[in-house]
Amino acid sequence: MTASYKFAQWRNDPVSFVKEIFGATPDPWQSDVLKIFPHKQRIALRASKGPGKTCVLAWLCWNFLLTRPHPKIAATSITADNLADGLWTEMAYWMNKSPLLKEMFVHTKTRIFAKDHPETWWMSARPWSKSADSDSQGNTLAGLHADFIVFIIDESGSIPPVIGAAAEAALSSCKEGHIIQAGNTTSRDGMLYQATVENAAMWHTISVNGDPDNPNRSPRVSTEWARQQIAMYGRDNPYVMVNVFSEFPSAGFNSIIGQEEVEAAMHRNYTEGEYGNAPRILGVDVAFSGDDSSVIFPRQGLQAFLPQQYRNINGTTGADITARKWKEWEADACFVDNTGGFGSSWVDNLQRLGFAPIGVHFNEKSSNVRYANKRTEMLFGVVDWIRGGGALPYNQELMAALTKTTYSQKGDKVIIEPKELLKQKLGYSPDHLDALALSFAHPVHRAPRYRDGWELPAADPYRNYHPLSPEVARQVGTGRNQPYNPYYRNGRGM
């Protein structure tokens, strides 16, 4: 290693290291972390959404790699993909900012090492398996022995405490050792809760959040966004508590369904004879912005069919497309997302074409007291349907949205994470999932079918057919006492 650089100063003053090596100015809370790093063995960063915690972890790792002799660093995260896309990418970003680091180190997909001492001077990525037993999980960080050692545990909010057991053991035999963990307050069963609540005396905790009324808040979290989340969902919403205030909710988060169950549904397929007597339902999700898609998702009983996806279409065009599908498929009901009024143009134009769509607001009251809102009720309708044998078309976006959606408890009710947070997690809007969920907005019964050319008698019950029960129809205000014809055809039936 080149002795001309101020290694001793940077070792004791990581703030100056960041400024001089990277030309960056840390946020106040990041400076606090950097200052205490040389002096504390255990540091826990309790963070809201987006304050820059992965950035400060990368700075600490580079500082340790550069200023200690023959150091070893082991890093893990909640998933292998998260480690690769988060901390490992951040390490590469800052390495490319520094000619010195590029000269001295090599960055690969799983290892960063000194060119002069590749076997003894390194940082390694160590993913762990959620499906492994606790003994195997506990070995994730095992086997490291060095005088200078650091364990980095990113997204520790949902990582089981057993992962950190081997790291604790390694601290007993080194000259300088640190365990640094950072995460969101997602679970009371994870390492972060254990460190910052149950074993708070052992850990130096720094909490950073996006509370718009906190003068020490992270400047990286939009004040406008934070106020919007509080206004829309309330301060006691578990997702607001985690993502804005970095507080632990009364209950942790769980995925609504596992990947294996979704994959099984995408491998199922039924014949028409197996679902033909079930009602035909269209779920229509209307795009809120140019980045989102409008999706029409058909479902009949246990069989869901390939959805139609469109970008940048207005209500007139969307209604025309929906009406054509409705008529060709002879659908019994069509539920249109009208959250925030975005679908009102589609609803109005469909009505002008002689159809009777039913608008649904995702944040309206659930018809099931178990759920906090309609969106939660509909998404769990999808989950129950899949577990009851539902067959899905293969769709990667749908699979990701299903398996990455989480729920929690709000008092005595189940609540799904806000769509905005899921969209940020996925990198796109979960339009396919929302359209499928809309097909579960309300129970539907099948309309009577008639052969082409048959006239409907004046007293025929089809003239007063409605896809919803009278009670539900009154609740959603669709005019149950008025004649309902979902596909107007001059009075003819099917």
Image (cartoon, rainbow, N blue to C red):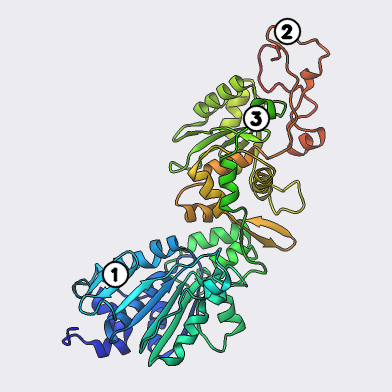
The kind of residue on which mark 2 rests is Trp
> The C terminus is located in which quarter?
top right
> The N terminus is located in which quarter?
bottom left
Q: CA distance from mark 1 to mark 2?
A: 74 Å
Q: Is residue 428 at least partly visible in the picture?
A: yes
Task: Please tell me in which quadrant of the rendered image residue 26 appears.
Answer: bottom left
Q: CA distance from mark 3 to mark 2?
A: 25 Å
Q: Nearer the viewer, residue 163 or 119?
A: 119
Q: Is residue 106 above or below residue 437?
A: below
Residue at 47% across, 73% down: 140
Q: Are the two marked residues, 1 and 2, in contact with CB atoms closer than 8 angstroms?
A: no
Residue 368: mark in rendering: none
Horizontal and vertical percent position of residue 220: 42, 67
Horizontal and vertical percent position of residue 484: 73, 23
Going from N to C along the chain, the mark reached first, 1 or 2, is 1
Horizontal and vertical percent position of residue 42: 47, 85
Q: Which residue does the numbered mark 3 point to in the structure image? A: 357
Q: Is residue 75 above or below residue 399?
A: below
Residue 454: mark in rendering: 2
Q: Which residue does the numbered mark 1 point to in the structure image? A: 94
Q: Label 2's element?
A: loop
Q: CA distance from mark 1 to mark 3?
A: 53 Å
Q: Nearer the viewer, mark 3 or mark 2?
A: 2
Task: Residue lying at the far right in this picture: please name it.
Answer: 459
The kind of residue on which mark 1 rests is Trp
Task: Please tell me in which quadrant of the rendered image residue 355 appears.
Answer: top right
